[in-house]
Amino acid sequence: MELPFAESYKIKMVEPIRKSTREEREEWIKTAKYNLFNLRSDQVFIDLLTDSGTGAMSDRQWAAMMLGDESYAGASSYYNLKSAIKNILGFDYFLPTHQGRAAENVLFSALVKEGDVVPGNSHFDTTKGHIEFRKAKAIDCTIDEAFNTTIQHPFKGNIDLTKLETVLSQHPKEQIPMIIVTVTCNSSGGQPVSMQNLKDVYALAKQYGIRVIFDSARFAENAYFIKLREEGYQDKSIKEIVKEMYQYADGMTMSSKKDAIVNMGGFIGFKEEELFKKACQFNIIYEGYITYGGMSGRDMNALAQGLDEGTEFEYLETRIRQVAYLGERLKKLGVPVQEPFGGHAIFIDAKRFLPHLPKEEFVAQTLAIELYKEAGIRGVEIGTLLADRDPETRENRYPALELVRLAIPRRVYTNNHMDVIAVACKNVYDRREQITRGYQITNESAIMRHFTVELTSAEEKAHVMI
Ligand code: F0G
Protein backbone atom coordinates (compact mmCIF):
# COMPACT_ATOMS: atom_id res chain seq x y z
CA MET A 1 0.00 0.00 0.00
CA GLU A 2 1.29 3.45 -0.89
CA LEU A 3 2.01 5.60 2.14
CA PRO A 4 -0.23 8.67 2.44
CA PHE A 5 1.22 12.16 2.24
CA ALA A 6 2.32 13.89 5.46
CA GLU A 7 3.77 17.26 6.35
CA SER A 8 7.53 17.80 6.01
CA TYR A 9 7.79 19.22 9.55
CA LYS A 10 6.65 18.55 13.10
CA ILE A 11 5.26 21.06 15.60
CA LYS A 12 7.37 22.51 18.41
CA MET A 13 5.23 25.39 19.65
CA VAL A 14 1.47 25.97 19.63
CA GLU A 15 -0.85 28.98 19.96
CA PRO A 16 -4.34 28.43 21.42
CA ILE A 17 -7.35 29.63 19.42
CA ARG A 18 -10.90 29.95 20.65
CA LYS A 19 -14.31 29.11 19.20
CA SER A 20 -17.23 31.49 19.65
CA THR A 21 -21.01 31.32 19.32
CA ARG A 22 -23.00 32.52 16.35
CA GLU A 23 -24.70 35.16 18.54
CA GLU A 24 -21.31 36.54 19.60
CA ARG A 25 -20.12 36.68 16.01
CA GLU A 26 -23.27 38.43 14.78
CA GLU A 27 -22.74 41.11 17.38
CA TRP A 28 -19.01 41.44 16.70
CA ILE A 29 -19.37 41.77 12.92
CA LYS A 30 -22.11 44.37 13.34
CA THR A 31 -19.88 46.38 15.67
CA ALA A 32 -17.09 45.97 13.09
CA LYS A 33 -19.39 47.71 10.56
CA TYR A 34 -19.37 44.53 8.50
CA ASN A 35 -15.70 45.03 7.66
CA LEU A 36 -13.70 41.90 8.48
CA PHE A 37 -10.52 43.98 8.89
CA ASN A 38 -12.14 45.60 11.94
CA LEU A 39 -12.50 42.33 13.86
CA ARG A 40 -10.12 41.57 16.70
CA SER A 41 -8.11 38.43 16.04
CA ASP A 42 -9.55 36.75 19.16
CA GLN A 43 -12.98 37.08 17.57
CA VAL A 44 -11.76 34.80 14.76
CA PHE A 45 -11.42 31.02 14.96
CA ILE A 46 -9.62 30.31 11.67
CA ASP A 47 -7.98 33.36 10.17
CA LEU A 48 -7.69 33.23 6.39
CA LEU A 49 -7.62 36.98 5.86
CA THR A 50 -4.16 36.70 4.40
CA ASP A 51 -1.12 34.49 4.04
CA SER A 52 1.02 37.61 4.46
CA GLY A 53 3.18 37.76 7.57
CA THR A 54 1.01 35.08 9.20
CA GLY A 55 3.29 32.09 8.66
CA ALA A 56 5.08 30.10 11.35
CA MET A 57 8.85 30.53 11.39
CA SER A 58 11.04 27.47 11.77
CA ASP A 59 13.39 26.69 14.65
CA ARG A 60 16.24 27.63 12.29
CA GLN A 61 14.72 31.04 11.62
CA TRP A 62 14.27 31.68 15.35
CA ALA A 63 17.85 30.58 15.93
CA ALA A 64 19.03 32.98 13.19
CA MET A 65 17.17 35.80 14.96
CA MET A 66 19.33 35.33 18.05
CA LEU A 67 22.39 36.02 15.91
CA GLY A 68 20.97 39.28 14.51
CA ASP A 69 23.47 42.13 14.26
CA GLU A 70 21.74 45.43 15.08
CA SER A 71 24.50 47.72 13.85
CA TYR A 72 23.11 50.76 12.05
CA ALA A 73 25.44 50.41 9.07
CA GLY A 74 27.08 47.35 7.55
CA ALA A 75 25.53 44.77 9.90
CA SER A 76 26.50 41.13 9.32
CA SER A 77 22.75 40.40 9.02
CA TYR A 78 22.63 42.70 5.99
CA TYR A 79 25.46 40.74 4.40
CA ASN A 80 23.73 37.43 5.21
CA LEU A 81 20.65 38.66 3.41
CA LYS A 82 22.71 40.07 0.54
CA SER A 83 24.35 36.71 -0.08
CA ALA A 84 21.02 34.82 0.19
CA ILE A 85 19.53 37.17 -2.43
CA LYS A 86 22.55 36.77 -4.69
CA ASN A 87 22.66 32.97 -4.32
CA ILE A 88 18.94 32.28 -4.64
CA LEU A 89 17.71 35.07 -6.93
CA GLY A 90 20.89 36.21 -8.63
CA PHE A 91 20.71 39.97 -7.93
CA ASP A 92 23.94 41.89 -7.33
CA TYR A 93 22.22 44.92 -5.79
CA PHE A 94 19.41 45.04 -3.26
CA LEU A 95 17.72 47.33 -0.77
CA PRO A 96 15.88 46.10 2.33
CA THR A 97 12.46 47.66 3.02
CA HIS A 98 9.95 47.11 5.78
CA GLN A 99 7.46 45.31 3.50
CA GLY A 100 6.40 44.83 -0.12
CA ARG A 101 4.50 48.07 -0.64
CA ALA A 102 7.47 49.98 0.75
CA ALA A 103 9.63 48.34 -1.92
CA GLU A 104 7.07 49.54 -4.48
CA ASN A 105 7.12 53.03 -3.01
CA VAL A 106 10.91 53.29 -3.19
CA LEU A 107 11.26 51.77 -6.65
CA PHE A 108 8.35 53.66 -8.17
CA SER A 109 9.62 56.94 -6.68
CA ALA A 110 12.69 56.39 -8.84
CA LEU A 111 10.80 55.22 -11.91
CA VAL A 112 7.16 56.31 -12.29
CA LYS A 113 5.94 59.78 -13.26
CA GLU A 114 2.59 61.35 -14.16
CA GLY A 115 1.17 60.13 -17.46
CA ASP A 116 3.18 56.87 -17.51
CA VAL A 117 1.66 53.49 -18.23
CA VAL A 118 2.68 50.28 -16.48
CA PRO A 119 1.47 47.11 -18.19
CA GLY A 120 1.40 43.82 -16.28
CA ASN A 121 -0.70 40.85 -15.21
CA SER A 122 -3.46 42.03 -12.82
CA HIS A 123 -1.36 44.30 -10.59
CA PHE A 124 -1.81 43.78 -6.86
CA ASP A 125 -3.85 46.54 -5.15
CA THR A 126 -0.91 48.28 -3.43
CA THR A 127 1.07 48.11 -6.67
CA LYS A 128 -1.81 49.67 -8.55
CA GLY A 129 -2.29 52.16 -5.71
CA HIS A 130 1.34 53.29 -5.94
CA ILE A 131 1.04 53.65 -9.72
CA GLU A 132 -2.27 55.56 -9.62
CA PHE A 133 -1.07 57.73 -6.72
CA ARG A 134 1.62 58.99 -9.10
CA LYS A 135 -1.07 59.73 -11.72
CA ALA A 136 0.15 56.92 -13.93
CA LYS A 137 -1.92 54.03 -15.22
CA ALA A 138 -1.70 50.27 -14.58
CA ILE A 139 -2.80 48.31 -17.65
CA ASP A 140 -3.92 44.71 -17.17
CA CYS A 141 -2.65 42.40 -19.91
CA THR A 142 -3.52 39.04 -18.29
CA ILE A 143 -4.77 36.28 -20.60
CA ASP A 144 -8.57 36.13 -20.93
CA GLU A 145 -8.74 32.59 -19.51
CA ALA A 146 -7.88 34.01 -16.07
CA PHE A 147 -11.26 35.68 -15.81
CA ASN A 148 -13.31 32.51 -16.14
CA THR A 149 -13.08 30.42 -12.98
CA THR A 150 -14.23 27.23 -14.72
CA ILE A 151 -11.59 27.10 -17.47
CA GLN A 152 -8.69 24.76 -16.76
CA HIS A 153 -5.42 26.40 -17.76
CA PRO A 154 -2.09 25.56 -16.12
CA PHE A 155 -0.77 29.14 -16.14
CA LYS A 156 -3.62 31.57 -15.64
CA GLY A 157 -1.16 34.24 -14.49
CA ASN A 158 0.31 34.50 -18.01
CA ILE A 159 0.51 37.79 -19.84
CA ASP A 160 -1.24 38.00 -23.21
CA LEU A 161 1.59 38.97 -25.54
CA THR A 162 -0.75 40.59 -28.07
CA LYS A 163 -2.29 42.81 -25.37
CA LEU A 164 1.20 43.66 -24.10
CA GLU A 165 2.52 44.49 -27.56
CA THR A 166 -0.47 46.78 -28.17
CA VAL A 167 0.49 48.79 -25.07
CA LEU A 168 4.19 48.81 -25.94
CA SER A 169 3.57 49.94 -29.50
CA GLN A 170 1.01 52.62 -28.63
CA HIS A 171 3.14 54.53 -26.13
CA PRO A 172 6.59 56.04 -26.41
CA LYS A 173 9.29 54.15 -24.54
CA GLU A 174 9.76 57.08 -22.14
CA GLN A 175 6.18 56.62 -20.92
CA ILE A 176 6.64 52.95 -19.97
CA PRO A 177 9.02 52.78 -17.00
CA MET A 178 8.55 49.00 -16.63
CA ILE A 179 6.41 45.96 -17.19
CA ILE A 180 5.39 44.30 -13.90
CA VAL A 181 4.99 40.54 -13.86
CA THR A 182 3.44 39.28 -10.63
CA VAL A 183 4.54 35.73 -9.75
CA THR A 184 2.24 34.10 -8.79
CA CYS A 185 -0.53 36.48 -9.80
CA ASN A 186 -2.44 37.19 -6.60
CA SER A 187 -5.25 39.25 -8.13
CA SER A 188 -6.17 36.57 -10.65
CA GLY A 189 -6.23 33.89 -7.96
CA GLY A 190 -2.67 32.94 -7.00
CA GLN A 191 -2.18 31.68 -10.53
CA PRO A 192 1.30 30.98 -11.88
CA VAL A 193 3.14 32.38 -14.88
CA SER A 194 4.94 29.85 -17.08
CA MET A 195 8.67 30.00 -17.74
CA GLN A 196 7.88 30.28 -21.45
CA ASN A 197 5.70 33.33 -20.79
CA LEU A 198 8.39 34.95 -18.63
CA LYS A 199 10.86 34.33 -21.44
CA ASP A 200 8.51 35.73 -24.12
CA VAL A 201 7.59 38.81 -22.09
CA TYR A 202 11.26 39.55 -21.52
CA ALA A 203 12.12 39.14 -25.21
CA LEU A 204 9.27 41.48 -26.22
CA ALA A 205 10.25 43.99 -23.56
CA LYS A 206 13.84 44.03 -24.78
CA GLN A 207 12.64 44.54 -28.36
CA TYR A 208 11.00 47.76 -27.15
CA GLY A 209 13.78 48.68 -24.71
CA ILE A 210 11.59 48.36 -21.59
CA ARG A 211 12.63 46.87 -18.24
CA VAL A 212 10.82 43.98 -16.59
CA ILE A 213 10.21 43.91 -12.84
CA PHE A 214 8.84 40.85 -11.06
CA ASP A 215 6.47 41.47 -8.17
CA SER A 216 7.86 38.44 -6.38
CA ALA A 217 5.78 37.90 -3.22
CA ARG A 218 5.05 34.26 -4.17
CA PHE A 219 7.91 33.51 -6.57
CA ALA A 220 8.70 30.12 -4.98
CA GLU A 221 5.12 28.90 -5.32
CA ASN A 222 5.34 29.98 -8.98
CA ALA A 223 8.51 27.88 -9.38
CA TYR A 224 6.74 24.88 -7.80
CA PHE A 225 3.95 25.10 -10.40
CA ILE A 226 6.52 25.36 -13.21
CA LYS A 227 8.16 22.18 -11.91
CA LEU A 228 4.83 20.35 -11.78
CA ARG A 229 3.15 21.68 -14.90
CA GLU A 230 5.69 22.82 -17.49
CA GLU A 231 7.50 20.44 -19.73
CA GLY A 232 11.23 20.15 -19.16
CA TYR A 233 11.24 21.19 -15.49
CA GLN A 234 10.23 17.99 -13.67
CA ASP A 235 13.81 17.07 -12.87
CA LYS A 236 14.99 20.54 -11.91
CA SER A 237 15.18 21.71 -8.31
CA ILE A 238 13.09 24.67 -7.17
CA LYS A 239 16.29 26.66 -6.71
CA GLU A 240 17.35 25.95 -10.30
CA ILE A 241 13.95 27.02 -11.59
CA VAL A 242 14.02 30.21 -9.50
CA LYS A 243 17.46 31.08 -10.89
CA GLU A 244 16.17 30.63 -14.42
CA MET A 245 13.03 32.71 -13.77
CA TYR A 246 15.10 35.70 -12.70
CA GLN A 247 17.15 35.62 -15.89
CA TYR A 248 14.05 37.20 -17.38
CA ALA A 249 13.79 40.11 -14.91
CA ASP A 250 15.75 43.34 -14.62
CA GLY A 251 14.61 43.83 -11.06
CA MET A 252 12.17 42.66 -8.42
CA THR A 253 10.07 43.92 -5.55
CA MET A 254 9.48 41.51 -2.73
CA SER A 255 7.00 41.21 0.09
CA SER A 256 9.03 38.81 2.22
CA LYS A 257 5.93 38.17 4.36
CA LYS A 258 4.78 35.50 1.91
CA ASP A 259 7.23 33.08 0.32
CA ALA A 260 10.16 34.01 2.57
CA ILE A 261 8.00 33.00 5.59
CA VAL A 262 8.77 35.97 7.84
CA ASN A 263 6.29 38.13 9.72
CA MET A 264 7.58 41.44 8.37
CA GLY A 265 10.01 42.55 5.69
CA GLY A 266 10.61 43.26 2.04
CA PHE A 267 13.29 44.19 -0.45
CA ILE A 268 14.08 45.36 -3.95
CA GLY A 269 16.51 43.49 -6.20
CA PHE A 270 18.30 45.31 -9.03
CA LYS A 271 20.50 44.34 -11.93
CA GLU A 272 21.11 47.97 -12.96
CA GLU A 273 23.62 49.74 -10.72
CA GLU A 274 22.42 53.19 -11.77
CA LEU A 275 18.81 52.49 -10.85
CA PHE A 276 19.96 51.00 -7.54
CA LYS A 277 21.86 54.21 -6.77
CA LYS A 278 18.84 56.36 -7.61
CA ALA A 279 16.59 54.21 -5.41
CA CYS A 280 19.05 54.44 -2.49
CA GLN A 281 18.09 58.07 -1.92
CA PHE A 282 14.42 57.20 -1.64
CA ASN A 283 15.18 54.25 0.61
CA ILE A 284 17.02 56.55 2.99
CA ILE A 285 14.14 59.05 3.12
CA TYR A 286 11.31 56.54 3.38
CA GLU A 287 12.71 53.36 4.93
CA GLY A 288 16.08 53.75 6.60
CA TYR A 289 19.74 53.57 5.79
CA ILE A 290 20.53 51.29 2.83
CA THR A 291 21.88 48.43 4.96
CA TYR A 292 18.73 48.03 7.05
CA GLY A 293 15.86 49.84 5.28
CA GLY A 294 13.30 49.49 8.06
CA MET A 295 14.30 45.99 9.13
CA SER A 296 15.99 44.87 12.33
CA GLY A 297 19.19 42.87 11.92
CA ARG A 298 17.48 39.84 13.48
CA ASP A 299 14.65 40.10 10.95
CA MET A 300 17.12 40.22 8.05
CA ASN A 301 18.72 37.06 9.42
CA ALA A 302 15.37 35.27 9.66
CA LEU A 303 14.57 36.41 6.12
CA ALA A 304 17.85 35.08 4.72
CA GLN A 305 17.05 31.69 6.30
CA GLY A 306 13.42 31.89 5.12
CA LEU A 307 14.47 32.45 1.50
CA ASP A 308 16.45 29.24 1.69
CA GLU A 309 13.68 27.17 3.35
CA GLY A 310 10.96 28.69 1.18
CA THR A 311 12.66 27.44 -1.97
CA GLU A 312 12.90 23.81 -0.81
CA PHE A 313 10.64 21.37 -2.65
CA GLU A 314 9.50 19.46 0.47
CA TYR A 315 8.27 22.61 2.15
CA LEU A 316 6.47 23.83 -0.99
CA GLU A 317 4.90 20.44 -1.58
CA THR A 318 3.44 20.42 1.96
CA ARG A 319 2.22 23.98 1.56
CA ILE A 320 0.58 23.73 -1.84
CA ARG A 321 -0.89 20.29 -1.22
CA GLN A 322 -2.68 21.67 1.84
CA VAL A 323 -4.22 24.45 -0.23
CA ALA A 324 -5.25 21.88 -2.86
CA TYR A 325 -6.69 19.62 -0.12
CA LEU A 326 -9.08 22.40 0.87
CA GLY A 327 -9.89 23.07 -2.79
CA GLU A 328 -10.72 19.41 -3.42
CA ARG A 329 -12.92 19.21 -0.33
CA LEU A 330 -14.87 22.28 -1.39
CA LYS A 331 -15.23 21.05 -4.93
CA LYS A 332 -16.56 17.69 -3.73
CA LEU A 333 -19.12 19.49 -1.59
CA GLY A 334 -20.32 21.44 -4.64
CA VAL A 335 -18.98 24.86 -3.61
CA PRO A 336 -17.96 26.87 -6.72
CA VAL A 337 -14.23 27.53 -6.52
CA GLN A 338 -11.70 28.86 -8.95
CA GLU A 339 -9.76 26.23 -10.84
CA PRO A 340 -7.04 25.26 -11.05
CA PHE A 341 -6.45 25.98 -7.35
CA GLY A 342 -4.06 28.82 -6.61
CA GLY A 343 -0.82 28.45 -4.68
CA HIS A 344 -1.63 30.40 -1.55
CA ALA A 345 -5.40 30.44 -1.40
CA ILE A 346 -8.67 28.99 -2.53
CA PHE A 347 -10.98 31.48 -4.18
CA ILE A 348 -14.72 30.97 -3.92
CA ASP A 349 -16.60 32.30 -6.92
CA ALA A 350 -19.20 34.46 -5.20
CA LYS A 351 -21.15 35.25 -8.36
CA ARG A 352 -21.73 31.55 -8.93
CA PHE A 353 -22.42 31.06 -5.21
CA LEU A 354 -24.97 33.90 -4.89
CA PRO A 355 -26.13 34.54 -8.49
CA HIS A 356 -29.35 36.19 -7.32
CA LEU A 357 -27.65 39.01 -5.38
CA PRO A 358 -27.39 42.43 -7.13
CA LYS A 359 -23.79 43.48 -7.84
CA GLU A 360 -24.43 46.85 -6.17
CA GLU A 361 -24.75 45.04 -2.82
CA PHE A 362 -21.19 43.62 -2.75
CA VAL A 363 -21.67 39.94 -3.50
CA ALA A 364 -18.27 38.63 -2.35
CA GLN A 365 -18.30 40.74 0.81
CA THR A 366 -21.75 39.35 1.64
CA LEU A 367 -20.44 35.82 1.30
CA ALA A 368 -17.34 36.58 3.40
CA ILE A 369 -19.60 37.91 6.18
CA GLU A 370 -21.83 34.82 6.03
CA LEU A 371 -18.80 32.57 6.36
CA TYR A 372 -17.63 34.47 9.41
CA LYS A 373 -21.06 34.24 11.01
CA GLU A 374 -21.21 30.52 10.25
CA ALA A 375 -17.95 29.41 11.84
CA GLY A 376 -15.70 32.33 12.79
CA ILE A 377 -13.70 31.95 9.58
CA ARG A 378 -12.27 35.19 8.28
CA GLY A 379 -11.67 35.32 4.51
CA VAL A 380 -11.34 38.43 2.40
CA GLU A 381 -13.34 40.02 -0.39
CA ILE A 382 -11.63 40.30 -3.77
CA GLY A 383 -14.43 42.02 -5.62
CA THR A 384 -16.13 45.38 -5.99
CA LEU A 385 -14.95 46.80 -2.67
CA LEU A 386 -11.35 46.03 -3.51
CA ALA A 387 -11.71 47.19 -7.12
CA ASP A 388 -12.62 50.59 -5.71
CA ARG A 389 -13.88 53.55 -7.74
CA ASP A 390 -12.53 54.73 -11.06
CA PRO A 391 -10.10 57.54 -10.16
CA GLU A 392 -11.59 59.79 -12.87
CA THR A 393 -15.33 59.08 -12.91
CA ARG A 394 -15.54 58.04 -9.21
CA GLU A 395 -18.00 55.31 -10.27
CA ASN A 396 -17.71 51.85 -8.70
CA ARG A 397 -15.60 49.52 -10.81
CA TYR A 398 -17.32 46.14 -11.16
CA PRO A 399 -14.61 43.52 -11.76
CA ALA A 400 -15.14 40.45 -13.92
CA LEU A 401 -14.83 38.25 -10.84
CA GLU A 402 -16.32 38.50 -7.35
CA LEU A 403 -14.20 36.24 -5.17
CA VAL A 404 -13.83 35.37 -1.52
CA ARG A 405 -10.22 34.51 -0.90
CA LEU A 406 -9.40 31.91 1.72
CA ALA A 407 -5.67 32.49 2.11
CA ILE A 408 -3.84 29.77 3.96
CA PRO A 409 -1.06 30.88 6.33
CA ARG A 410 2.14 28.88 5.91
CA ARG A 411 2.81 26.03 8.39
CA VAL A 412 0.01 27.24 10.72
CA TYR A 413 -3.19 25.20 10.40
CA THR A 414 -3.72 21.45 10.07
CA ASN A 415 -5.95 19.61 7.63
CA ASN A 416 -8.56 19.28 10.41
CA HIS A 417 -8.90 23.05 10.15
CA MET A 418 -9.27 22.68 6.37
CA ASP A 419 -12.14 20.23 7.01
CA VAL A 420 -13.91 22.74 9.28
CA ILE A 421 -13.56 25.44 6.62
CA ALA A 422 -14.94 23.16 3.91
CA VAL A 423 -18.00 22.16 5.93
CA ALA A 424 -18.68 25.75 6.98
CA CYS A 425 -18.67 26.79 3.29
CA LYS A 426 -20.99 23.91 2.47
CA ASN A 427 -23.43 24.94 5.22
CA VAL A 428 -23.60 28.49 3.85
CA TYR A 429 -23.99 27.07 0.35
CA ASP A 430 -26.95 24.95 1.44
CA ARG A 431 -28.80 28.02 2.68
CA ARG A 432 -27.66 30.36 -0.12
CA GLU A 433 -31.19 31.05 -1.31
CA GLN A 434 -32.06 32.61 2.04
CA ILE A 435 -29.29 35.17 1.53
CA THR A 436 -31.28 37.70 -0.45
CA ARG A 437 -29.73 41.02 0.45
CA GLY A 438 -26.17 42.29 0.68
CA TYR A 439 -24.61 45.46 2.10
CA GLN A 440 -24.33 49.16 1.40
CA ILE A 441 -21.49 51.57 2.11
CA THR A 442 -21.99 54.14 4.85
CA ASN A 443 -18.42 55.45 4.90
CA GLU A 444 -15.39 55.02 2.64
CA SER A 445 -11.97 56.53 2.08
CA ALA A 446 -10.79 58.03 -1.21
CA ILE A 447 -8.18 55.36 -1.88
CA MET A 448 -7.93 51.66 -0.88
CA ARG A 449 -11.34 51.82 0.71
CA HIS A 450 -11.64 48.11 1.47
CA PHE A 451 -9.37 48.38 4.53
CA THR A 452 -11.54 50.91 6.35
CA VAL A 453 -14.93 50.85 4.63
CA GLU A 454 -18.02 50.84 6.84
CA LEU A 455 -21.11 48.96 5.73
CA THR A 456 -24.66 48.38 6.77
CA SER A 457 -27.01 45.60 5.81
CA ALA A 458 -28.94 46.62 2.69
CA GLU A 459 -32.10 45.14 4.21
CA GLU A 460 -31.82 47.19 7.41
CA LYS A 461 -31.03 50.30 5.42
CA ALA A 462 -34.15 49.76 3.29
CA HIS A 463 -36.27 49.52 6.47
CA VAL A 464 -34.75 52.72 7.88
CA MET A 465 -35.51 54.57 4.64
CA ILE A 466 -39.13 53.45 4.70
N1 F0G B 1 2.50 42.27 -4.23
C1 F0G B 1 1.71 41.20 -4.08
C2 F0G B 1 1.51 40.23 -5.20
C3 F0G B 1 1.04 41.02 -2.86
O1 F0G B 1 0.23 39.97 -2.71
C4 F0G B 1 1.25 41.95 -1.81
C5 F0G B 1 0.58 41.80 -0.54
C6 F0G B 1 2.12 43.03 -2.03
C7 F0G B 1 2.73 43.15 -3.26
C8 F0G B 1 2.37 44.06 -0.96
O2 F0G B 1 3.17 43.54 0.02
O3 F0G B 1 1.77 43.54 2.10
O4 F0G B 1 4.24 43.31 2.20
O5 F0G B 1 3.23 45.46 1.60
N2 F0G B 1 -0.38 41.03 -0.36
C9 F0G B 1 -1.05 40.75 0.88
C10 F0G B 1 -2.20 39.83 0.63
C11 F0G B 1 -1.39 41.92 1.70
O6 F0G B 1 -3.00 39.63 1.56
O7 F0G B 1 -2.31 39.25 -0.45
P1 F0G B 1 3.09 43.99 1.57
Image (cartoon, rainbow, N blue to C red):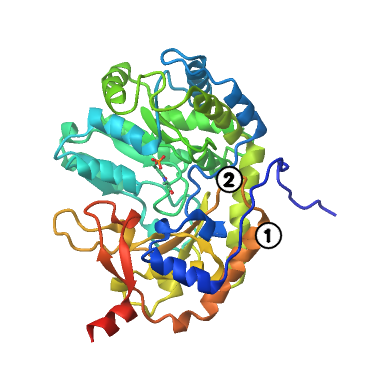
At which x and y percent is residue 126?
Answer: 32, 45
Q: Quadrant of residue 198?
A: top left
Q: Quadrant of residue 131?
A: top left
Mark 2: amino acid? Arg
Dot 2 and dot 1 residues touching (CB under 8 Å): no
State the residue lying farthest toward the right.
1
At which x and y percent is residue 117?
Answer: 21, 41
The residue pinned by badge 2 equals 410
Q: Quadrant of ligand 1?
A: top left
Give the camera-side residue of 237 and 438. 438
Viewport quadrant of the C terminus: bottom left
| Residue 164 visible within the image | no
Image position of 354 with respect to 214: above or below: below
The residue pinned by badge 1 equals 416
Label 2 sits on a secondary structure element that is loop
At which x and y percent is residue 13?
Answer: 68, 42
Q: Quadrant of residue 35?
A: bottom left
Classed neighbour count for the residue bearing mark 2: other residues with Cα under 10 Å, few (<14), some (14–19), many (≥20):
many
Q: Is 355 placed left or right of 17 in the picture?
A: left
Q: Residue, x 37% and y 40% (percent of image)?
A: 181
Mark 1: amino acid? Asn
Label 1 sits on a secondary structure element that is helix
At which x and y percent is residue 246?
Answer: 45, 29
Q: Residue, x 54% and y 24% (percent of image)?
A: 301
Q: Is 324 placed left or right of 154 in the picture?
A: right
Q: Residue, x 37% and y 63% (percent of image)?
A: 401
The numbered mark at residue 427 is none
